[in-house]
Amino acid sequence: MRPIFYFLQLFVLVFSHSLFAQTDLVIWESYASRTEIIRDQWGVPHIYGKTDADAVFGMIYAQCEDDFNRVETNYINAMGRMAEVEGISQLYIDLRMKLYIDPEVVKEEYQNSPQWLKSLMDAWAAGINYYLHTHPEVQPKLISQFEPWMALTFSEGSIGGDIETISANGLKSFYGENSHQLLSYTERDWEEDPRGSNGFAIAPKLTKSGNAMLMINPHTSFYFRPEVHMVSEEGLNAYGAVTWGQFFIYQGFSEYNGWMHTSAKADAIDHYALTVEKRKGKYHYKFGKNWRPFTEKKITVKYKEGNELLEQEFTTFYSHHGPVIRSEGDKWIAIALMVEREKALTQSYQRTKTKNHEEFKANMNLKTNSSNSTVYADKDGTIAYYHGNFIPKRDPQFDWRNVVDGSNPSTDWQGLHDIEEIIYIENPNNGWIQHCNSDPFNALGKDSPKRTDYPAYVAWDVENARGINAVRILSEVKELTLEQLITNVAYEPTLMAFERLVPSLIKAHDELPTHDTKKSKLKDPINILSEWDLKTGVSSVGTSLAVFWGNQLMASIRNKERAWDIYIFDFITEALSNEEKLEAFEQAIDKLVDDFGTWNTPWGEINRFQRVTNDIQGKFYDELPSLPIGYNASVWGSLAAYGSRAYPNTKKWYGNVGNSFVAAVEFGEKVRAKSLLAGGQSGNPFSPHFVDQAEMYSQGEFKEVNYYREDVLNHARKRYRPGESEL
């Protein structure tokens, strides 16, 4: 009887799986029947669905068509599973994510979510799975079946979330003990990394049309977000950039309003030093007069080694402040940060359906946009700025820039600040708002909020060259057109970092004794710099000299002590001697000669755009075609940011971060927008939309956005339902 019994069991299992798969297929095809995708002349997908869920299904399907690899990779990373693909090198990166992502907890959060949100997550998973079903040639690296709860693991679209501020090296030292001694991580420099963003809002009184305008200019790694348009019969009509794999427009606009997120140092994260003792075999930490036991949690991280999948189990420790992430001396350091996945996903999606500032502000009151500030403009003429969103109330007697005493109950968070208690600006008299990851107390120039009116932890931001340049430009604007918002503001080429530096170098050269060899060696390049107008451009030799010199200066001050709140280029100008500045300039000249044969090299011959592969970590080749780029790294004050560098196999510099998706929007009776992508919409090197915007990108030439259906249809190149050929 046993063989017959086992055969029946196997039959029931196979039949059940087949029935389940058929049921899934019916559901997927039902979504597809209510969804239409129209690709315009740039390959941008315009998704039309009867319901929001239908639009979500179609937009994630279209994302998978454009670059499934990036969709999947973002969720492999979000769930802490990169080591299963890339091996042991990602072990502690995964541990960092798994401190917060427990699948069983997230599944429960999904089950407890409101029905409207569950329906969107269901549609999201269905869209990806239907894509895989209809494209059997696509082989996922790891995730062959997406589940709705997974959407909650990546609920906020910023380029570097709060969890990524945790040091992987610190985790390895604390939890790794003596294993993996050779494993080391390059930590992101959160002070000097060129990624950031610019947001400009212009009130009607300063525009020629009398309409409010918004400049959406995130600085991200290239191809981090594609361009998408989502429309439903339930009131959704949002256009903009979506972070690969997510189902909401992260930076974008509707016909009513627009939103731009900029990275800021509004304090949303704290580190607590814990006094620890082992009592009765368990670790405890002191809190007030008591000792509290740590919550211990076993976390298993799997990793690939050769053809095997191995695993390592970690015993992790959690205090009421949050998980322990490293040690300092005899103290354990715990981190407190925002963990509100369902609420964060709700805020991220619902902002795209707001119709005025009152609704948008109510959405901001969910307070889960923890790593960003927001610049806003709308059809009613309102412009606004929110510096941060999730800001805990704290006792101001403590230094919240540094680690605080976790044993002192006075360091506990005391709820969250209301919107009006953070730096919040609405319809300022000057008629404009700017934020460039810069000092929010310069957001309006001379009309800005006062630092003394707020707790220090509300804004640890310092001024940068972009912020100074933006204030200079915006203070003079009037009768602005949408085109001028792009050319005269967002792409204005002055490198303000060198405003004081260059005169100080010329002075240092002038003061050299006549017989000093540097006097004659540096004379000609000094003359070029003395005539340079501080503007970056492809034909500018002054730009090349300044940037190579600037890099030498930045290296020379790396180990010098400086106050955290000083403007870095004031510090360089004043802290370095004439001799140090001239020595750095001589090194820059030598470097240019070594790499390009002459110091007299225009910036465009050095600074290039190239896209020849779709590897997430780009590859570049001097021998292959590339385009000259006149923009520059944001650190020097270039509003149109272009972070580039040489690679081990190149002399030329190739961009990989900066302006990627950019849009300028005007809110009139009908919304009008112009946009631009680095390269193009598709991640497929064989697609006509892989680099069809590259030349435009190199020249700052924007395309007109097709927002209204008649415009979309007039420029349609492909019209279809998911899973079908063209309609």
Image: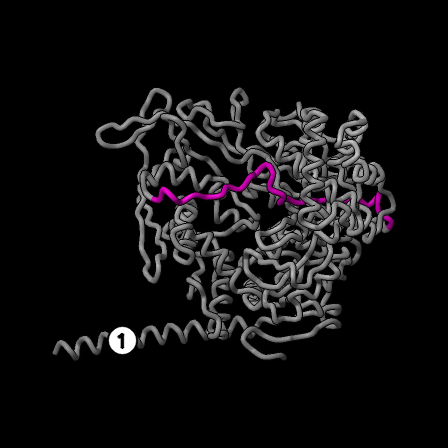
Identify which residue, 707 or 725, lies in the foreground: 725
Q: Residue at x 34, y 73 (%)?
A: 17
Identify which residue, 33 or 11, lies in the foreground: 11
Q: Quadrant of the C terminus?
A: bottom right
Q: Is residue 638 left or right of residue 194?
A: right
Q: Main secondary structure of the magenta part?
A: loop
Q: Residue at x 40, y 39 (%)?
A: 171
Q: Quadrant of the N terminus?
A: bottom left
Q: How many numbered circles does the render carry? A: 1
The x, y position of residue 39, in whole percent, is 66, 70
- Pick out the residue farthest to the front: 515
Q: Would you say residue 166 sits in the magenta stretch?
A: no
Packing grade of label 1 (10 A; few <14, some 14-19, many >=20) is: few
- Write the start and end of the magenta stretch as one range: 180-208
Is 456 above or below relative to 7?
A: above
- Residue placed under numbered mark 1 in the picture: 12
Is 206 above or below relative to 622?
A: above
Which scheme is used to colour this image of the protein? one colour
Q: Residue at x 48, y 71 (%)?
A: 138
Locate residue 329: give its quadrant.
Answer: top left
